[in-house]
Image: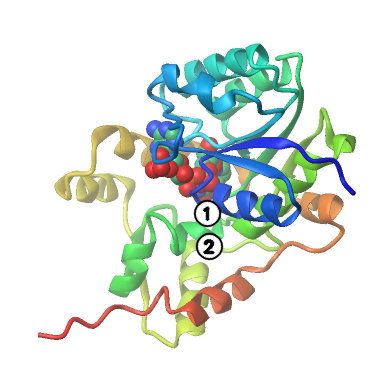
Amino acid sequence: MKQQHNILVIGGTGKTGRRVADLLQQKNQHVRIGSRSQDPPFDWQDPATWTAALEGMDRVYITYHPDLAVPGAYEAITGLVAAAKKAGVQKLVLLSGKGEREAERCEDVVATSGLDYTLVRASWFNQNFSESFFLEPVLSGRVAMPMPEARIPFVDADDIAEVAVEVLLNDAHNGQTYEISGPRLLTFAEAVSEIAEATGRNIQFQPVSLEDYAQGMEAQGVPAPVIWLFKYLFTEVLGNPRNSEVTRDVAKVLGRPAKDFRTYAREVAATGAWTPKVTMI
Ligand SMILES: NC(=O)c1ccc[n+]([C@@H]2O[C@H](COP(=O)([O-])OP(=O)(O)OC[C@H]3O[C@@H](n4cnc5c(N)ncnc54)[C@H](OP(=O)(O)O)[C@@H]3O)[C@@H](O)[C@H]2O)c1
């Protein structure tokens, strides 16, 4: 029988964490979810909650919410790593962003911690269209976004989770940094067209300037730090040529190709998640 570990999955009800927790449980690992809604709770904004969440854990999967690029993330990761060492944790796996300078500062904290570690740098997730900020626009039938020229190797959260589980459980990956992407580059217009095709719905892509996009968010009452994050993601991340590279690390770690956006779109369409709700009066 494979060794059983006690693994804290931070963000374990989120896009990748939920999948990581499910896969680990299928492999008979002991999983504790780290999030505000759990018992004991884990809150990035409240370091007093970290010790109880880390107690008795030997490995930790770290996702930071909302993004490693936001102000305060570096200090939080630094504090968490210190608390993890104190708690006797042996290995850390950090989910990071590909080509994100701010995230690399956080990676350094993990890589120089003295603990075993693996860094997983991901491209933009497919699931941003189905489990996050682009779901509402897809449901509305009009997706307006800046950076229409960006070509993005969207990666699937299922692949990220499988890579995370493999590196959490297999020490042959210690000290490695994996850059994981999907198998091809798509513009936002192409991604939206794939979703329209998979759902059979008329969904339009509308390019907008970054200024108009930010103003639209402001008018909807989106908090200033979130607007800042979007601006950062659209300019620093999508504007970085390194982020339009297809990588082979999913195949390297899992021995199979990464999931294509079209497969993802068909899978999600079949669940009805992109079918607008009809309200009966
Ligand atoms: N989205 C992308 O395209 C992309 C691309 C590359 C890298 N990344 C990286 O991916 C990471 C995010 O991973 P993800 O998308 O899997 O997670 P996610 O879906 O954004 O995270 C949601 C999870 O975080 C928990 N959470 C929210 N606020 C929290 C807080 N204050 N304290 C503790 N837990 C909190 C939520 O549970 P509760 O509500 O119960 O607390 C939930 O479990 C970030 O570090 C980002 O840099 C994202």
What residue is shown with label 1? 150
Q: Position of residue 90 (x, y in %)?
A: 75, 23
Q: What's the mark number on residue 134?
A: none
Nearest to the observer: residue 190 or residue 224: 224
Q: Quadrant of residue 87?
A: top right
Look at the image and tell me whether residue 239 can be seen: no
For residue 65, which quarter of the picture?
Answer: top left
SS type, badge 2: loop
Q: Compare residues 168 and 224 and report the one nearer the observer.
A: 168
Secondary structure under the numbered disc 1 in the rendered image = loop
The residue located at (60%, 56%) in the rendering is: 157
Question: For the residues marked 1 and 2, what is the alpha-carbon distance in whole angstroms?
Answer: 6 Å
Is the residue under label 2 in contact with that under label 1 (CB below 8 Å)? yes
Q: Is residue 147 left or right of residue 84?
A: left
Q: Is residue 169 left or right of residue 188?
A: right
- Give me the disc on residue 187: 2
State whether residue 20 is above or below residue 226. below
Residue 44 lies left or right of residue 58; in this view the side is: left
The residue drawn where x is 41% and y is 23% is 71
Mark 2: which amino acid? Thr
Q: Residue at x 49, y 49 (%)?
A: 14
Instruction: Indicate the quadrant containing the C terminus: top left, top right, bottom left or bottom right.
Output: bottom left
